[in-house]
Amino acid sequence: MDQLNFDGSCNPNPGGRMGFGWVISWKNKKPCTQGRKEIKGSPSNTNNVAEYTALKEGILNYTDLGGKGPLQVCGDSKLVINQMAGKWKINNPNLAELHSQITAAVKKNKLKIRYKWVPRSENSDADRLALPDSQQHAAIPVARKVIADTNTASVKPHLRISINELNTDPSPGFKSFAQLKVGGLDQFSRIRIEELRKLAGKEAAALVKKEFADELQHQASALRWMLRGLAADLAVRKVKVDTEISKRSVKGRTIS
C-alpha cells in the first residue's frame, strides 16, 4: 500500500505564514516523493487550515503522479485525521470547505484511503518540509542519504521513532547511537552479506567496504541499519560506536 505523510504549520498562529509538507512512500519501493509549498500570512491562516491544505496538496500530487491507491494517509493532526475518517464533526466553515475539496478529489480519482494518526516523531520528514523556507537548509542534515523509508521497512515502532530522530538530528552524539537497539531479531538480522549488498545497492555496498575493509561482520551490520532506514553515514557511525563499546567492555573484563 502506498503511504502519504502530511503536515502543515502556521507561524504565528493564527494569521502567520503557512507551510505545507508531504511525503509519498510508494509500495513498489521506488524513491519517496517529497513536496512542499508556502504562502504568506493572512488573517484566515491557522494551523488546522495548514494541516488540511497539506493533505490536499499531498493527495493532488499523488494522483498527478499516477497514484491509484489503496493509500494510507498518516498525519499527526488528530483533528484532520478523525474528521477525514468521519469520526469527528466539522464546525469550522473554512475546514469544511477544505474537507469537501479533498473528498471530491478522492472521489474523482476513485481512491481507497485509510486514515491513520501518528505521533509527530513518526512524521518528522513531513514536519520538516512544512517549516519556513529560511529553515529548510538548517533542517536537512548535510550528506544524509537514506536508502529505505522507516515507514515501509517494517521496523518496530520504537525503532522507527529512534531512527527518524537520528536522521533529522544535525549532530547526534555517542549516547544516541549507543541507545539505538533493535530489541531482538528482526527481518534483517539473519540476512547474509551477499543478499544485503543486493538489497542495499552498489553505492551502499561500496561505502561500507571502504569504511570497514575486510570486516564483513561490520559491513553487514551497517547495511542492515541502512535497510532499516538509518541514513548511510549514521549507519557507519552506529557500527563504529558499537565496536567501541565492545572494545571497552572487553578491556574492562580483562582488567578485572
Image: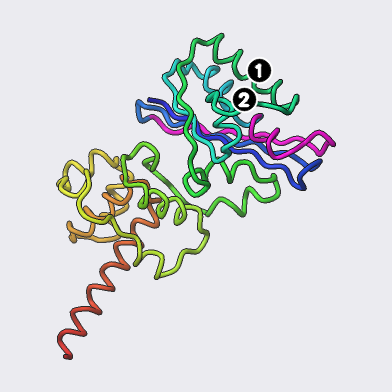
Please name the residue that numbered disc 1 is placed on: 101
Residue range in magenta is 30-52
Q: How many marks?
A: 2
36 part of magenta stretch: yes
Comparing 146 with 38, the one in front is 38
Q: Residue furthest right?
A: 43
Instruction: Establish if 248 lies above or below 52.
Output: below
Looking at the picture, which amino acid does disc 2 mark? Lys
Mark number, residue 221:
none
Evaluate if marks 1 and 2 touch, with contact meaning CB atoms under 8 Å apart: yes
Q: How is the image coloured?
A: rainbow
Q: Which residue is mark 2?
A: 56
Which quarter of the picture shows residue 68? top left
- Name the residue rendered at 28%, 73% in the picture: 244
What's the residue at 52%, 11% (across, down)? Answer: 109
Q: Nearer the viewer, residue 241 or 103?
A: 103
- Residue 30 rendering spot, x and y as whole percentages: 39, 29
Amino acid tagged 1: Gln
Determine whether, in the image, residue 91 is placed left or right of residue 43.
left
* SS for callout 2: helix
Q: Secondary structure at mark 1?
A: helix
Say whether disc 1 or disc 2 marks the residue closer to the N-terminus: 2
Q: In this orientation, which residue lies closer to the viewer: 209 or 71?
A: 71
> Residue drawn at (44%, 56%), measured in percent from left and top?
166
**12 lies above or below 96:** below
Q: Count residues near mark 2 (Cα–Cα under 10 Å), then give few for <14, some for 14-19, many for 20+.
A: many
Q: Is residue 201 above or below residue 81?
A: below
Q: Position of residue 97 (x, y in %)?
A: 71, 20
Task: Name the outermost residue toward the bottom.
Answer: 256
Give the residue drawn at x 46%, y 51%.
144
Report crowding for label 1: few under 14, some 14 to 19, many 20 or more residues within 10 A (C-alpha).
some
